[in-house]
Image (tube, rainbow, N blue to C red):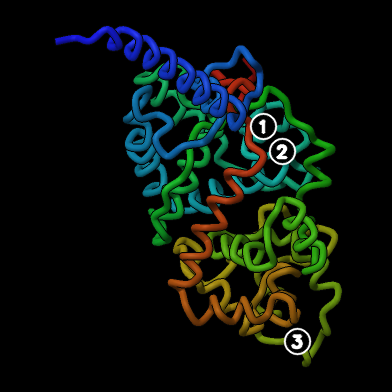
Amino acid sequence: MRTKMEPVILACTRVWLIIISCLVFSIAGDIGVMSSSSSTVAEATAGLLSYQYYETSCPQVESIVADKLTPILLSDPASSAALLRLLFHDCQVQGCDASILLDSDTSEMGSRKNFAIHNRETIGIIKTAVDSVCPGTVSCSDILVLAARDAVAMSGGPEMKVLLGRKDSNTSNHTFADASLPAANAGVSEILSIFTKRGMTVEESVVILGSHTLGVSHCVNIMDRFSRQIIGANRTPFETLLEVRCAFGASISNSGTVGNDVTITKFDNQYYKDTIRGRGLLKIDSDMSTDPRTAPIVERFAQNQNEFFKEFTAAFLKLTSANVLTGHQGLVRTKCNAVN
């Protein structure tokens, strides 16, 4: 039997529920990524990267990327190195925003530090396949991250989970790119300075350089190193081999290449082993095994591939998640090589 106090208690309970709800939404708004008083909780969390970002909007995205990428890598194993290089150059400049995919970069590609960037068209092919299932949903920057991630795994490297939800920019900055990317003849100090500006530690910088285990370097990028080498009988067998492989001199061709290590299509720790043995190709590869800041890390990765894989996974996640466009900061491009 209801007492006279029950209506009062029920009314008070409703009031307290309303107050608590208001407090919850107020706190959520305070800690959300957008502070506007008109923002809802959903909008406040929309700017965050997530492992489940496309869980409802495009749950097939990862399988589509893998399915389209597999035949490309089988027909051209060098694509793995190209995609990984493409990703790192994109992320190192303005954050992973797919600005490197814009056609406006093409005319200056040969004279800038983005020399030898390839396989941008691969991302466009994958984007078309994704949009046929989930039109206008998945950004080119997320597709690039997924493609590079899969390229590593399909080449024998670690299988990595990546956060998704990046948006694309509609601009690229050539001047900023030149200031943000290392030159081919950069030494340890310059490389560490560039990476630490992006929030990377010395160990993370060394492990990201381990991506050199895939692919080749152009002869034109190691000319400076050879200008500093002792010639004649004091030249090492490795240096002699490079001289044979590359036609050094004024007539050097941009098409001449040398493998970064002896397993150029396999993602492993061979790069560090070669570096310790004096077979580092670029100046940074050669110097990293003797510089006291980096030598112990190089030695550790050379001895333990599992350790290299573990640290590479963490550094990959950190670099691809830093300074990205999310929520309303960017957009989803219709075509990866053109502004909307």
Q: Residue furthest bottom?
A: 233
Q: Which residue is mark 3?
A: 235
Sequence-earlier tag: 3 or 2 = 2
Q: Secondary structure at mark 2?
A: helix
Residue at 37% x, 9% y: name it: 11
Task: Determine whether label 2 and label 1 are within 8 Å by CB.
Answer: yes
Q: Secondary structure at mark 3?
A: loop
Which marked residue is nearer to the observer: mark 3 or mark 2?
Answer: 2
Q: Nearer the viewer, residue 193 or 179?
A: 193
Q: Position of residue 107 (x, y in %)?
A: 76, 31
Q: Is residue 22 above or below residue 229?
A: above
Residue 101 found in image quarter? top right
- Cα separation, mark 1 vs mark 3, equals 42 Å
Sequence-earlier tag: 1 or 3 = 1
Q: Which residue is mark 2?
A: 94
- Tell me the tag on residue 99: 1
Q: Secondary structure at mark 1?
A: helix
- Cα separation, mark 2 vs mark 1, equals 8 Å
* Left or right of 213, for residue 192: right
Residue 65 found in image quarter? top left
Q: Position of residue 46 (x, y in %)?
A: 52, 25
Q: Quadrant of the N terminus?
A: top left
* Left or right of 182, for residue 200: left
Amino acid type, residue under disc 2 in the picture: Gln
